[in-house]
Amino acid sequence: MKTDFDIRTEDMPANMRVLLEDYPRDSWEAHPGFKDKTQHWLGAHQMFRKLGALVRSEAEHYLDKSREPDDFAARLSYYGNALVGNLHGHHGWEDHSYFPELSAADPRFEAGLEILEKDHKELDFVLDRFTNVANRAIKLIQLDEVQAREEVGKLHGIAEAIEAFLARHLSDEEELAVPIILHHRLRG
């Protein structure tokens, strides 16, 4: 079974971020083309970042024994499910609806699209691994505390990988898509 994740760490190539110079991140909210739909999309990204951090910190609380096992299991189940389910839904919508709209509006988006879609495929693998390990950890909490702690240790590593993935991917996605949205006044 694959245990290493192919999480891209380098920035998107500069030629894929050509409009970012004209529409820097700190100017987005003041731009007249920055509409509610774009705010909601960015808000979803913020939620994913927070959920990723929360799942990692919950594992840390369990491992340092500041979170009771049953409480941890319930929180992991709730927040882990929210993270995985919402990320799958969000990325599916991007791949089938949002990204094709951006590609049709501006061919420059195509250059980054291949990288973003590869990221989505790798994230699917990471989320599947996370789900399997989380489910095993939840079961083991009721059966064997020592094995549960080992499994949560693995889960913590995967949660860190998810956080690193989201930090890189979501930032690149935003810095590629939002300037195109603003430039072409899309998503009104």
Image (cartoon, grey):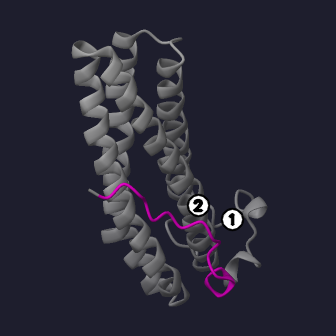
Q: Residues within 10 Å of mark 1 (few under 14, many from 20)?
A: few
Residue 17 lies in what quarter of the image? bottom right
| Residue name at image x 39 percent, y 23 percent | 149
Above or below 34: residue 86: above
Image position of 128 (left or right of 13): left
Residue 123, given in percent of the width and then of the height, sits at 39, 58
**Amino acid beneath label 1:** Pro
Image position of 108 (left or right of 146): right
Residue 182, given in percent of the width and then of the height, sits at 63, 72
**Amino acid beneath label 2:** Arg
Residue 121 lies in what quarter of the image? bottom left
| Residue name at image x 56 percent, y 52 percent | 164
Residue 77, given in percent of the width and then of the height, sits at 31, 27
Question: Which mark is drawn over residue 168?
Answer: 2
Rounded to the nearest angstrom, the CA distance separating label 2 from label 1 is 27 Å
**Marks 2 and 1, the one that precedes in the sequence:** 1
Q: Which residues are magenta?
A: 2-17
Image position of 51 (left or right of 117): right
Q: Is residue 55 magenta?
A: no
Q: Quadrant of the N terminus?
A: bottom left
Question: Which mark is drawn over residue 32?
Answer: 1
| Residue name at image x 49 percent, y 21 percent | 63
Q: Residues within 10 Å of mark 2 (few under 14, many from 20)?
A: some
Q: Main secondary structure of the magenta part?
A: loop
Q: Nearer the viewer, mark 2 or mark 1?
A: 2
